[in-house]
Amino acid sequence: MEFGGARKRGRPDGGAATNGNGGIKKSKQAKISENEALSNDEELERKTMSKKKIAKEHMQQLQRLQEKDPEFYEFLKEHDKELLDFNDEDVDDEAETDVDSEDIEEDAETDEYLMKHVPSVAVEAKSSKNVITTAMVDSWCKSIQENTSLGAVRALMKAYRTACHYGDDSGDDNANQLSIMSSSVFNKIMLFVLSEMDGILRGLLKLPPSGGKKETLLDLMSTRLWKNYNHLVKSYLGNSLHVLNQMTDTKMISFTLRRLRYSSIFLAAYPALLRKYVKVVLHFWGSGGGALPVVSLLFLRDLCLQFGSDCIDDCFKGMYKAYVLNCQSFTATKLQHIQFLGNCFTELLRVDPGAAYQHAFIFIRQLAMILRETTTRTKKNSKLSFKELFRKVYGWKFMNCLELWTGAICAYSSEADLKPLAYPLTQIITATARLVPTAQYFPLRLWCIKMLNRIAASTGTFIPVSLLLLEMLEIKELHRPPTGGVGEAVDFRTMLRVKKSALKTRAFQEMCVFSVIEELTEHLAQWSYSAAFFELSFVPTVQLREFCKSTKVERFRREMRQLIRQIEANCEFTNKKRMSVAILPNDPGAASLLEDEKMKGSSPLSQYATVLRERAQQRNDSVTQSSVIVGERTSIFGSKITDDDEQDDSVNEEGVTAFNSGWLPGSDSTYHPLSNCLSADFTCRKGEREKEEKEVPRGGSF
């Protein structure tokens, strides 16, 4: 019994302390018991102290034990040497590596990888330990390409984050932070990551090489693969978004968006990032130059196709707001760019016609409310004067919005979703044309008439446009000699209102008469194959003859007589066919009476309309002094955009061209086509967005 009790008290692990003869010394047992009691008393205090202090205290206890009882110390040295071979460095190392932060663990793995696999790092660590060099980047890229080394991927992503945040003001003075040495290193990192990271991430997550569905990624989020590698995906997307806000060169932005477009499916896992990407890309679409608007449109279209209602509403509203903001001013050089933006918006509506109808209904109703406020104004119900109210309608924003929805309805006139909106839009356009029936606003009226002709042609609906045109021939300015001289050339496409001094010029009178003839011909040519053409053209023919009698300008008489002869020839053309067939006006077969002739385009008015279009095009080309590249080629959607889009796979040449400058994020740069903000580009764009939100129409007014 005495042997067993001594065995329990002898060592902390329950082992026996014996002498060379196998016996137990009582004095040594007492000292061991005393040491055990001391350790029990100080147990609570040690828990509150750091591991390093505990290690130092334990070492001091061993030293005191050696001085007080050398005999017992020798006994422990002989039978329990591991207890005395304690080193405080072991505790320090364990404390440094025992960190819960995932980022610090990754940094430790990255640093270990750098020292192990990149020889130049160990050599350069003494002088510039945290500087990224070309040799380091080349080594990572080689390891990734050869064996997809995960350590190299993490090291490269850490360098990519450093490159994207270069120049940021951070209060973190972390000694382990990397830094970029030169712009060449920055360009190399950006080019490789943007070109290859999508394939690397897809390989790690076992996803198809391209494409993908939202449902597939959502299912992947519950797997271990996603838990292991989702931080790489988020780092890639988040840092790319950050550097997009810092970039100022359109080539860099275009290349970056092209490459990020392949990885857009990953945004399904990060709704907050998705919303930020939509806002940034919408800004690029509305304010960018060169190929940037096209690239931005393709990016937004992919997001809408992949995420559906999660993204479509924001894209529709954002593009409409950006379009309105671009329509504040209008010039001949900006005409094609505005048309291009409108075509982009129309193309995006194709993604979801049902959602497009809801947004179109809301925005068209908003235009109707603005017009109603102007037409029903009284002194009691409005604080604004009539002039202030009608300027809301007779402005570039309002008119371009009508043009936008006219283009959308004409493009999808065969769709059951958007076709019902043709009638309310026609009512708004007609009321707008009649709001201020003066000669000064003839350019605006002609614009409305052109929109009505387009709606009628696309929907196959008769719209009485001739009344609006014939009213223009009755103004007194056309029946007086041009006392203002020849005057400057007038381009009705780029103005809403003509100056009073220009009303008495010869150029204005000619432009009015020629425009009326062209639009009236377009209107009548649409119905030149109708069995009722004779009845439709009777009133216009009578008023044209009256104008020929009243005007004193011979060139106007000549143009009017030519149009009258074409109308009469077309009446003979339709009457001859109508007389050969016994049909009634309400017979459904009357609509297809001249269907074969319509396919051939053989009516006299159709051929005359073609001649007038060519003449108008030549006149417009002579007036326009310059052209806009954006819109000339990119405003037409078709196979060309798809072909250019498929060439994105050959990114080396384009990427090297984009990332070949000395630009670094956060530094001064000579590139800034979008604004005058250089070092604080992100702050500038943030201010622009806040300004846009204030200027965007809400409720019932602009």
Image: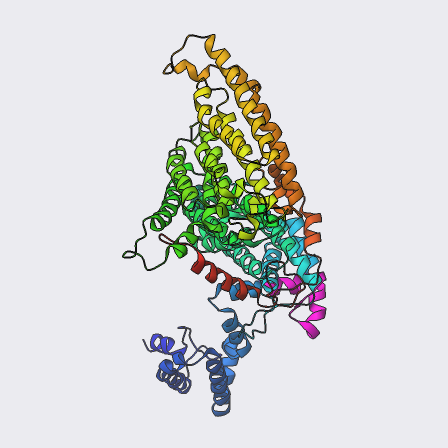
Q: Please, is residue 536 above or below residue 640 in the view?
A: above
Question: Which quarter of the rendered picture does the C terminus lie within?
Answer: bottom left
Q: Residue pushed farthest left?
A: 380
Residue 198 seen in the current view: no
Residue at 60% in and 39% down = 641
Quarter of the image where the N terminus is located: bottom left
Write down the quadrant of residue 554 in the picture: top right
| Majority secondary structure in the magenta region | helix
Query: What segment carries the magenta color?
Result: 110-136
Q: Position of residue 6 (x, y in %)?
A: 36, 78
Q: Which residue occupies the foreground of this view, 490 or 493?
A: 490
Which residue is nearer to you in this view: 417 or 402? Answer: 402
Viewer-closest of 264 and 74: 264
The image position of residue 108, as x and y in percent, is 56, 66
The answer to if 111 sits in the magenta stretch is: yes
Q: Position of residue 449 (x, y in %)?
A: 48, 37
